[in-house]
Image: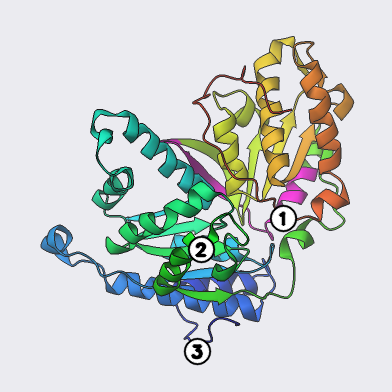
Amino acid sequence: MSAVTLRLERSGPVSTAYAALAGSGVLMADPAQREAAGLLDAVLAGLVAEQPKGLFGRLFDKPEPVKGLYLHGEVGRGKTMLMDLFFAAVPIAEKRRVHFHEFMDEMHAGMAAFRKSKKGKDADPVEAVVKPIVKSGLRLLCLDEFHVHDITNAMLLTRLFEKLFASGVTLVATSNVEPDELYKDGLNRQLFLPFIALLKSHVTVASLPAARDYRRMKFAGQHVYAFGTGPEATAEMDRLWLRITGGVAGAPGVVESIGRQIHVPLMAMGAARFGFADLCEKPLGSRDFVRIAHQFDSVIIDHVPQMDRQKSDAAKRFILLIDNLYDRGVKLGASFDVPLEQLGKDDKTAFEFQRTVSRLVEMQSEEYLGKGLRDAPSEVVPDDVGSPDRHPRA
């Protein structure tokens, strides 16, 4: 590994779970991934060793911060899969996993709300957003896709993480770039350099030079759409699901979205499977679809119907959903009741649906399936839950 070379026992929970997946044929074993699993085992062992003991320990002992991990490498090399295994294996309740841009959006939204409050006139807004995190006892923060390209984030990170690290929070992050490349060529980058030094002092920096782009291999030569209402369409989606999960059947789960939970019927290995009704006939909005697009690299949707005027609200949600999946580069598998050009039969959404069908056509192409996820940051949007009338972006 380029940034760190450690000899670790490969008997910890992450390494064991990784070996089980490789042994069952779910994934192909990769030496770089095995090494990264060992590094994650070391972080996990530190967190377990530093747990406060007993009631008085929880009340009065402040855990010493455990050195975290910053794992970087090209897209599709297995960083998210390893984070999945690590987060599931950490046996403490005071942990959180979130996409980096979503976390920063929350911080900015919290500071904006605090500034508008009576207390916000003279007090420190950074202290205000960190305080509830510290009060919650958070010990592990896992951030997916750490990438800084926004000056507002760049200027906030040093003060924010000084306080988080001082409170004992351990950071584990994945990224496509090494720390020294963060915010490269950004405006006033010299003001950002103290954060890079701070980050490197609290994490082990490791590269993941895996030999293959596993995400691209999942979809090589695959037909991702099925058409018709019979069992053949469902069977085709079943086959695609097992292909992209490596044979893992999956289990129900949830996506956290601003204080509430979105039910996911099946999730496994970075993929999620929904019925059309799960996403488009429930009070979900753009913010929820952003969360889904950031949490999964692949999504399967079963039984997408023809959308006439009676399904006008569902059609609007479907348009928002496809916009967000497309903007992010998420891979889509879907079964449709009718051909794509017959999906939209509501004059209220006819114009928007033209773009949606165009994107659906592109999303089944080898060119689209061969690309990695786009770094499309989440955005703070008004609470549009249950309000499909919000028009998607042109």
Q: Nearer the viewer, mark 3 or mark 2?
A: 2
Depicted 309 relative to depicted 9: above or below: above
Q: Residue at x 43, y 51 (%)?
A: 156
Q: Does residue 173 appear to the left or right of 218 in the view shown?
A: left
Mark identifier at residue 218: none
Q: Residues within 10 Å of mark 1 (few under 14, many from 20)?
A: many
- Give the residue pinned by disc 3: 7
Disc 2 target residue: 190
In the figure, is residue 340 to the left or right of 201?
Answer: right
Q: Say what amino acid the circle numbered 2 marks.
A: Gln
Q: Earlier in the sequence, mark 1 or mark 2?
A: 2
Circle 1 — which element? helix
Q: Is residue 192 above or below residue 118?
A: below
Image quadrant containing the C terminus: top right
Give the residue at x 61% y 66%: 177
Can the viewer see residue 228?
no
